[in-house]
Structure formats: C-alpha cells, structure tokens
Image (cartoon, rainbow, N blue to C red):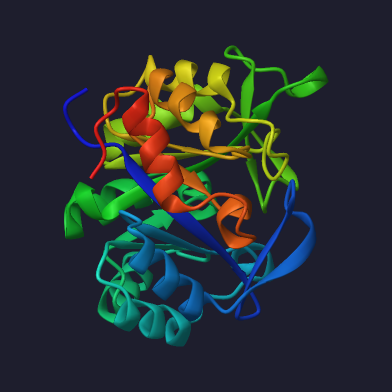
Amino acid sequence: MSLAVRVIPCLDVDAGRVVKGINFKELRDAGDPVELARTYDAEGADELTFLDISASHEGRATTLEIVSATAEQVFIPLTVGGGIRSVDDVDRMLRAGADKIAVNTAAIHRPELVAEIADRFGNQVLVLSVDARRATGESRTDSGFEVTTHGGRKSAGIDAIEWASRAAALGAGEILLNAMDADGTEDGFDIELLRAVRSEVSVPVIASGGAGAAEHFPPAVEAGADAVLAATIFHFGKVRVGEVKDTLAGAGYPVR
C-alpha cells in the first residue's frame, strides 16, 4: 500500500445535532456539528463525513445550512449524505460546500442514479454508502451479507457484496462500508465483511462501524480498507485522531 491511510471522523446528524447510539438506536447527543468539524480539522483528520441519519426515512433533504456552515469551518474534504435522491440534490450539496456525496437508499431503489451522478460530476465525487449486516433466515444471501436501508431498520433483500461490486462498475468512486452488526459496539471493525468486499471491488473502501480503540484500526487496513471512519470514540474523547494515526504508523501503514 503506497497511498496514505485516511482517518475520517463521521458526524451522524439528527435535527441539527450530532448524535451517536448503538446500531442506530438509543441516540445520545454528541454536540454541534460545526464545532466538532472545526475540532477534527484542527486535530489532523484527513476528511469529514456528514450523514443526516434521519433524512431518508423522514423523507427530507439534508440541511443545507448546516453543510454550508460546516464547509466554511474546515479545510479538508467533506462528504455529505442523507436524503440524496437526484443529480439536482447532488448539485445543491456541492454548491453548499460538499466535496463528495454519499448515496445509499436512493441508489438501491434506482441503481442508474449512480451512473447519472458519476457521468455528471465524475466518480471521484460519488461515495456509495452500504449498510451491510449478516443475513439470516429467509434473507440469506450468497455472500452471507445483506444490504439494509433506513439506518438498518429494513432489509433491502440484496447481497451486500454483489451490490458494492455493481455500484463500483456503475461509477461509484468509493465504498463506505458500514458494518451494521458492529455499529456503536466499540468491539472492532467487521474484518470478515471488509475482506469480502475488498476481494470484489478495486475502488477505495472506507471501513465503518465498531471502532472502540486505536488498536482496532490497523486490522481494518490489513483487511483491505483504504480509509478508516469512526464516530463514537472521537465524539466522546475516548480516542483522538492523532492516536489513530500514530497507531497506524506504528503498524507500518503510511499516514498523512
């Protein structure tokens, strides 16, 4: 691996506040998104991801004002997701200050949206967010992993590995791989899921879900992650961005 591993704090935003829970339930207030963004920029984060976690199931667009205010405060790439349904939505977010756009639910319902966004803005702008979990019972898939929607509330009935591969072929520039089984547990990243996706896609993969300590990050990179994303441990001061970078560097991985 020659490219530096990116360390990305994630701001899960609900009603204008950063929140965090376990498996997207029992949400706790974690602060003001603009203030947190400013802090992470100063700490040396490589990028920021801003996800409006209630946008899709509440049927509204991400708050443009918060995106704009956040973008004004940071000097690192900002990825925005939540409620993105069309090329016009992407255009509005980019004009508000986003550098990349994450799509999830809308792309599942209409996969050609991935190609439309990539054709209009370039695949470097497009991040496919995949909320994946182990499939059980009637929802069993070939890979053993399925895609979920609405913050893990619903099964999409499709194979997570196949979907990541298809979206990459359609033009997704990166895969944000959210391990729903691990989300908020702080027990470590889902290494099996990471390896499964890495074996099928050549675009960068961002590991998300389960980070609880600095030592959890190198195994994710070893499993194929090009970037590592976390929320809870950063928001509540358990681990700092610099500690993650030091740990990755100590394990032999290049960091910025």
Counting from the top left corner in percent of width and height, residue 74 is at: 31, 74
Q: Is residue 123 above or below residue 158?
A: below
Q: Residue at x 47, y 82 (%)?
A: 66
Question: Is residue 140 shown left or right of residue 63?
Answer: right
Q: From where the camera sits, is residue 225 visible?
A: yes
Query: Vertical placement of 170 versus 158: above or below?
Result: below
For the point 29% across and 76% down, the residue is: 97
x then y, percent, for residue 42: 35, 68
- Across and down, in percent, residue 32 comes to 57, 79
Residue for point 63% across, 53% down: 232
Asked if residue 226 is positioned above or below residue 61 in the image, the reply reads above
Q: Quadrant of the C terminus?
A: top left
Instruction: Pick the residue in front: 165 or 157.
Output: 165
- Could you tell whether 160 is left or right of 187 in the image? left
Q: Residue 37: name its quadrant.
A: bottom left
- Residue 175 can be seen in this image: no
Task: Name the spot of residue 220 as percent of width and height, x first.
Answer: 47, 26
Q: Is residue 221 left or right of residue 219?
A: left
Task: Using the image as rendered, state which of residue 119 and residue 239 is in the foreground.
Answer: 239
